Amino acid sequence: MSDVELRHLTTMAAVADEGSFGRAAARLGYTQSTVSQQIAALEKAVGGAVFDRPGGPKPVRITPLGAVVLAHGRELLAKAEAMTVAIDRFKAGDGRIDIGTFQSVSNVILPLVIRGLRAEHPGCDIRLFEEETDQPDLQDLDLMFFDSRVDGEVEHRKLFDDPYLLIARRGTFPDGPVHPALLDGAPMVAHPPICDQARMEQALARNGVRPQIVCRTAGNETVLSMVRAGMGSAILPQLAIRGADIDSDPSLCVHRLEPAPPPREIFLLWQAHRTHSPLAARAIEIIAEVADEIAERT
């Protein structure tokens, strides 16, 4: 059976549909002798005749063995056609892409990326997986956003620097930039000490600035709600603030820190030596375009 080829099955189906080798040849664009050769090769592979040939003008008739072969052959031909369509769609960009992300990227960057991909490839399948973690796992992902460089079998592309800003209730600090020394001992709402949050707090501590952390929460909106409630101020990356529409809230004020702590770095990661699908390759291009626009506005 390993000698059966799709072209043999295609020829058999044409003969069965047309009732003669000659009409099947005309339909397929073959010579009649080519049709005969392919049917002979099929019969050799399956070990018996698939057509009875009465001769003359009478139509050929399928044999009982031929009926079994044809039924399964049509299924194989349908699957082969479906695979061809799927491959063509994949090459055109209508495949699936799995992207790892985190809050501020999900709020600000990915909506623009998704709109761009869907505009070009309406049938594409986009899956997003949001997680706040110190240990990124790219095993089941095509791409992943992360806020630091990663060692190992990982390639990366730096997208932009994301500076830290101070969010406080209006009037807590004088207008304009705030020196970090004013935060020493001050009540502070903060993210959990993972990812770049830990590095930012360590940078403050090296300069003798140790705020009093009164609340830790992973949610950007929860951080801002606690600041509004008077729990304390917060130091957030600009991308997190951009996604929260702070400008429309008169109770809050955004201050630059001078001198500023090192900015958070936003990277796009993927597994090293991995061949990208056309959709993933285009996603990288769109992500880079969106990141450049954000960096310019920053």
Image: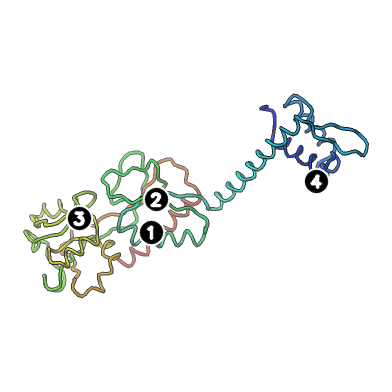
Q: Secondary structure at mark 3?
A: loop
The amino acid beneath tag 2 is Ile
Question: First in sequence: mark 3 or mark 4?
Answer: 4
Which marked residue is nearer to the observer: mark 2 or mark 3?
3
Q: Which mark is residue 110?
A: 1
Q: Is residue 183 left or right of residue 242?
A: left
Is residue 112 positioned above or below 24 on the image?
Answer: below
Residues at marks 1 and 2 touching, judged by CB atoms closer than 8 Å: yes
Q: Residues within 10 Å of mark 3 (few under 14, many from 20)?
A: some
- Quadrant of the rendered image containing residue 53: top right
Question: First in sequence: mark 1 or mark 2?
Answer: 2
Q: Secondary structure at mark 1?
A: helix
Alpha carbons under labels 1 and 4: distance apart: 50 Å
- Which of these two is toward me, 179 or 114? 114
Residues at marks 1 and 4 touching, judged by CB atoms closer than 8 Å: no
Which marked residue is nearer to the observer: mark 1 or mark 4?
4
Task: Quadrant for the N terminus, please.
Answer: top right
Residues at marks 3 and 1 touching, judged by CB atoms closer than 8 Å: no
Q: Which mark is residue 217?
A: 3
Question: First in sequence: mark 4 or mark 2?
Answer: 4
Which marked residue is nearer to the observer: mark 3 or mark 1?
3
Is residue 222 positioned above or below 9 on the image?
Answer: below
Q: Secondary structure at mark 2?
A: strand
Residue picked out by circle 4: 27
Question: First in sequence: mark 1 or mark 4?
Answer: 4
Q: Secondary structure at mark 4?
A: helix
- Residue at 23% x, 54% y: name it: 218
